[in-house]
Amino acid sequence: MIPADFDPDEGGSPEESLETYARLRRSCPVARGEGYGGFWALTRYADVAAAAGDPVTFISSVRAVVPSDPRGLRRPPLNYDAPAHTPYRRALDRTLQRARIARLEPRLREHAARELAPLLERGGGDIAQEFGAQFPAWVTTEWLNLDPELAPELAVTAARWVRAWRALDREVVGETSERMYGIARDLVRDRRAAPRPVEEDPASSLRAERPGGRPLEEEHIVGALRQCLVVGMVAPPILLGSICVHLSRHRELQSELRARPDLMPAAMEEFLRLYTPYRGFARTVGHEIELHGRRIRPGEPVTLVYASANRDEEVFPDPDAFVLGRPNIAAHLAFGRGRHACAGMPLARLSMRVALEELLRRTSALEVCGPVESARMPEIGAVSVPVRLRPS
């Protein structure tokens, strides 16, 4: 048995985890992680980027996340390799083109304003668990063209699923996942009866795919949509919570972004680099390899630690500082890279920018006013952030 080089859950705070990754980058860039059955962690930018861009050596069909779904289920496209992965990804990408994303922005602003209103009336609340969990449910509802009545239920169900998944609570994971499978099946059933334009509707786009002249299996389409119901719900509360902690500590940046909203797109990219909400997704190797003197064998999980790569001082000078307008900010790996880069990144960028713009526009001050709860594997960041808000 290979001895562990680090415990991913030791300490618990994001700062402690990032200190561990900095140590590993210097002295043990391919590290053995303790827990979750054991896994390898790539911590340097060059290694993470190379692995993400090499889907032949680093495959996703065996293990895509550490820890995995406790029931061992596999859904496309995350858990598929090419060519099986490709039609699902093509179908989803078709619904995330620039023109469609732009058309969603006004409605997303309306949703953000409405979900912020109760916090502003109370003078604060948990920005991550309230606004950070509820607004993304509306983003997912708009993208998938769900019945608006489902958005509040999706927010609650997805949050319960995430908590249970982190705790490896098989019973609650199964219960909440089955409810989301029910939403996905209803969606497919509706689109079978009344298809929508494929550029506007993920379910219709998936049903229109014909790889090899044959349609995708309906249960696999359901699985892909079930995955879509969750992927946009996990990261936003953590990213928004982490950003609010940063803004609470740096009041001058709050003021600058309120006065100069044109700076928000550049600021959001630096926030994504600094506060990448996933430690990283996982792969296994298709054949035995040796990297930095460590031998990795097929079947052994290999995590691509994006959160570490995005603070690699060899790529991002002064990596722990917020630097607006970094010359190479486009190189960050917050959304991954390669075939399995986040399909929803255009929508994620828009929705997080809208959320932060509306939050700052509607307040004159924001400050953390209580204990911050930190995420555990596979995420990193703040999952609960009580804030005091002064309405503008």
Image (cartoon, rainbow, N blue to C red):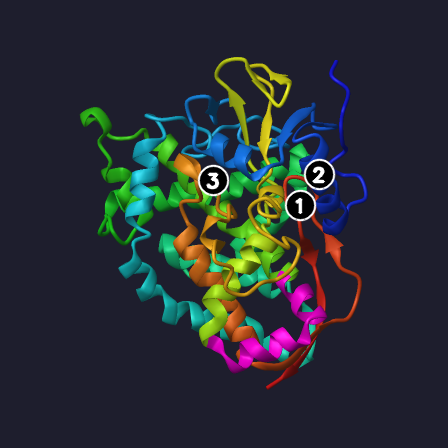
Residue matched to label 3: 181
Q: Please tell me whether mark 1 or mark 3 is closer to you in this view.
A: 1
Q: Secondary structure at mark 3?
A: helix
Relative to 114, residue 331 above or below: above
Question: How much space separates mark 2 and mark 3, taking CA atoms?
Answer: 21 Å
Q: Quadrant of residue 346?
A: bottom left
Name the N-terminal-most of marks 2 and 3.
Answer: 2
Residue 167: which numbered mark, if any?
2
Answer whether labels 2 and 1 touch (C-beta < 8 Å).
yes
Q: Secondary structure at mark 1?
A: helix
The residue furthest left is 213
Residue extent of the magenta highlight: 243-261
Q: Please tell me whether mark 2 or mark 3 is closer to you in this view.
A: 2
Please rate how many residues cluster around mark 2, counting C-alpha atoms within 10 Å: few if below 14, some from 14 to 19, many from 20: some
Q: Residue 19, position in %: x, y?
A: 74, 45
Q: Secondary structure at mark 2?
A: loop
